[in-house]
Every structure is written in C-alpha cells, then in structure tokens.
Image (spheres, helix red, strand yellow):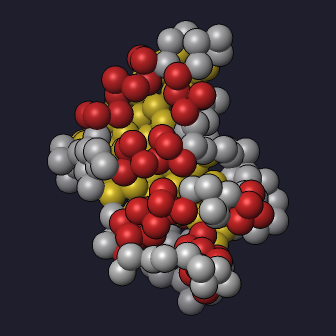
Amino acid sequence: MLSKESEQSLFIPVSNNHPEFFTMRIDDRRKFNRLLPKYPKSMKIVSCWHSIELILEWVEKVDYLEIVVGDSLVNGYKKQLHQKLNEFEKLYQLQKEGRFKIFVTSEKQIHSKLYIFENDNEIVALNGSLNFTKSGIEAKHQKNYIWGKKFTKGVKYDDLNKIQEDYKWHKSMCYPFFGDYEELIANNPEVDRKD
C-alpha cells in the first residue's frame, strides 16, 4: 500500500530470495581491481575521496559511471580549474552524453564507501573501507576489508531494494558538481571550450 505521506517509505513485502554473500580481505589492491572489469554496464560509487585520474580511467570502461563524493571538494576543484581543465571538459562532455554523473556534498562530510556494480546478469553491492582513489586502489601498504552481496538480475531482493535506497539517501545530501562547473567556465572567458 502506497502511503500518502511523501516522507514515508513504500512497504514492499518480504521476499524469500537471498543474494550470495561474500567478503574480501584486501592486502593487495589488484584483487579489488580484478573485480571491476566484470561489471562494465554501470558503476555507482559513494566514496569520501576520489581521484580524477581513476574516474577518467574507469569512465572509459563502463557504459555509465556515477560518483557521490563525500568530501566537499568544490573549492579544491576551483583551484584546479586551470590545471585540470581538459579532464573536467572530458567528464562534462560525458555527463552531457548521459554516461557520467558526479555529485558533491554541500555541508556534512560523508565517510561511507558504497559500490553498486552491474553487468548484464547481476548486480553486486560492496561496503567497506576502500576509497575510490588512485592511491587507494594501488596502495600496497594498506589493508582493507569489504563485504558484498551478489544479486541475479530479474529476481526480486529486499536487500537490493534497501541498498539502492541507501545509495539514494547518500545522493540526496549532495548536488550535481557540473552546475558549479558551468559557472566556473562562465567566469573564465579566457578558457577555450570545445562544444
């Protein structure tokens, strides 16, 4: 039954389907890196910190990439405008094509790390200590731990519904970064943009 109150959640009956549960002890990030290419359809990521270089690498390998940045980095982006303009232009173009979105937090830092990856047959959700940064993915002196659930597509799972709602909750605390970016470009007329 759908509630008339918009603040209340839709009640979904409990199903008997159980996803595959797994854990990963990560002494070497290559173990995590080997997981990523298995999910080329979609990647949705909540990470306190991220790396532009890593985003540029993975946005070319998936049909759709969405990042929720948990640290308020917009001022840092403004300082990097002239140094990383080509990278931001490329991401902005991918955003216009519907292949990429990035959201940044406006006030509170979000320290969560949540990954939702998808291919043609399954969706995997991961939670743990791993940030989506170049140093985080390649670090050899860090130990990380994640747990995950693997869901077969076309099957109803209550756990998946809950995880997707949690992802939306993280995103609700953020705003699209490229709104700020368009303002930055407008305020820098010396920048030669390619349309």
Task: Choose top left, top right, bottom left or bottom right for residue 133.
Answer: top right
| Relative height, residue 145 to residue 19 (above, below) | above
| Relative horizontal placement of residue 32, taking residue 51 as reference (left or right) | left
Q: Is residue 16 visible?
A: no
Residue 34 lies, in percent from the top left, at 34, 23
Farthest residue in the right direction? 107
| Relative height, residue 173 to residue 190 (above, below) | above
Residue 130 lies, in percent from the top left, at 59, 31
Residue at image location 31% in from the left, 49% down from the top:
60
Residue at image location 28% in from the left, 45% down from the top:
61
Q: Is residue 28 visible?
A: yes
* Quarter of the image with the C terminus in it: bottom left
Residue 190 lies, in percent from the top left, at 59, 79
Residue at image location 55% in from the left, 33% down from the top:
134
134 or 71: nearer the viewer = 134
| Relative horizontal placement of residue 126, taking residue 64 as reference (left or right) | right
Residue at image location 62% in from the left, 55% down from the top:
83
* Quarter of the image with the N terminus in it: bottom left
- Count the labels in the image: 0
175 or 93: nearer the viewer = 93
Task: Choose top left, top right, bottom left or bottom right for residue 127.
Answer: top right
190 or 179: nearer the viewer = 190
Residue 117 lies, in percent from the top left, at 37, 44
Task: Choose top left, top right, bottom left or bottom right for residue 166.
Answer: bottom right
| Relative height, residue 31 to residue 186 (above, below) | above
| Relative horizontal placement of residue 49, taking residue 27 as reference (left or right) | right
Farthest residue in the front direction? 190
